[in-house]
């Protein structure tokens, strides 16, 4: 049986509390230390889960006070996200194929007027990816932030929200993928995308984004084929 990652266990616990309305908008949730003690996991794993939920918009962090359930209609968001988090690889490929067009469209809009501030933010996320090539959860989270930054910088609120939903769904799958194929592909393509953005080359930026998603699709298909082969060998 596949074991649930510690950070995912914390994530699922928080989501269920919000989903069941046991924790209402505005409620303060347990601290990282308390969550770690309650769910028998590390503070770092609890922090990873909180960061993902904050990125999605289900939680907000108030400096010096802790994390709180966001003041929003969380039910509809969770009902949409949770089934996607439990996707099989076939469904994951469908979402990635959608992202192939979604992400390339995002960067095309973004390249109309990329600000120096946004480019600096992209550089910071890429630098953290470089610093954490073997930390799958951290690497995937910074990957998420990189794409979310581009989506937000399009200036289109709907695009930004859809991007958060889709990329959050893929975080755990990307972490697993990172463990399977390593971080080289992600680091290579994010650098190419960033270099094209800094050079102001819209066509190259769009092309590199497309190739990045295509490489991810190929990797998922490759791991699916490998898993099927292993299952075949283990069958009686």
Image (cartoon, rainbow, N blue to C red):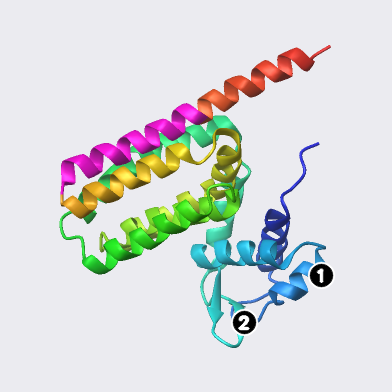
Res. 168 in view: yes
Q: Earlier in the sequence, mark 1 or mark 2?
A: 1
Image quadrant in which you'd find residue 101 = top left
Image quadrant in which you'd find residue 158 = bottom left
Q: Is residue 74 left or right of residue 204?
A: right
Residue 233 position within the rendered picture, expressed as x and y whole percent measured from the top left: 75, 13
Q: Nearer the viewer, residue 5 or 28?
A: 5
Say what secondary structure mark 1 lies in.
helix
Q: Give the residue at x 56% y 61%.
A: 52
Which residue appears farthest toward the front when viewing the image?
A: 131
The N terminus, quarter of image:
top right
> What segment carries the magenta color?
201-219
Which residue is identified by label 2? 66
Residue 222 position within the rendered picture, expressed as x and y whole percent measured from the top left: 53, 24
Find the distance from the CA under tag 1 to the CA under tag 2.
Answer: 17 Å
Residue 54 position within the rendered picture, expressed as x and y whole percent measured from the top left: 54, 68
């Amino acid at each position: 049986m596949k074991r649930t990652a510690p950070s995912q266990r914390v994530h699922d616990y928080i989501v269920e509390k919000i989903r069941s309305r046991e924790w209402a908008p505005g409620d303060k949730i347990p601290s990282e230390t308390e969550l770690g003690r309650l769910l028998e996991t590390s503070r770092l794993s609890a922090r990873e889960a909180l960061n993902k939920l904050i990125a999605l918009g289900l939680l907000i962090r108030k400096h010096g006070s802790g994390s709180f359930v966001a003041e929003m209609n969380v039910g509809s968001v969770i009902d949409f996200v949770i089934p996607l988090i439990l996707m099989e690889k076939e469904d994951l490929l469908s979402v990635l194929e959608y992202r192939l067009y979604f992400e390339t469209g995002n960067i095309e809009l973004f390249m109309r007027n990329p600000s120096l501030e946004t480019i600096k933010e992209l550089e910071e996320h890429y630098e953290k990816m470089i610093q954490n090539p073997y930390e799958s959860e951290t690497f995937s989270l910074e990957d998420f932030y990189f794409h979310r930054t581009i989506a937000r910088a399009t200036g289109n609120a709907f695009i930004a929200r859809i991007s958060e939903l889709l990329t959050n769904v893929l975080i755990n799958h990307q972490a697993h993928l990172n463990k399977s194929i390593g971080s080289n592909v992600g680091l290579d393509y994010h650098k190419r995308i960033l270099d094209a953005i800094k050079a102001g080359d819209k066509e190259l930026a769009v092309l590199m984004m497309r190739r990045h998603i295509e490489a991810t699709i190929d990797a998922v298909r490759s791991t699916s084929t490998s898993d099927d082969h292993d299952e075949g060998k283990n069958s009686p």
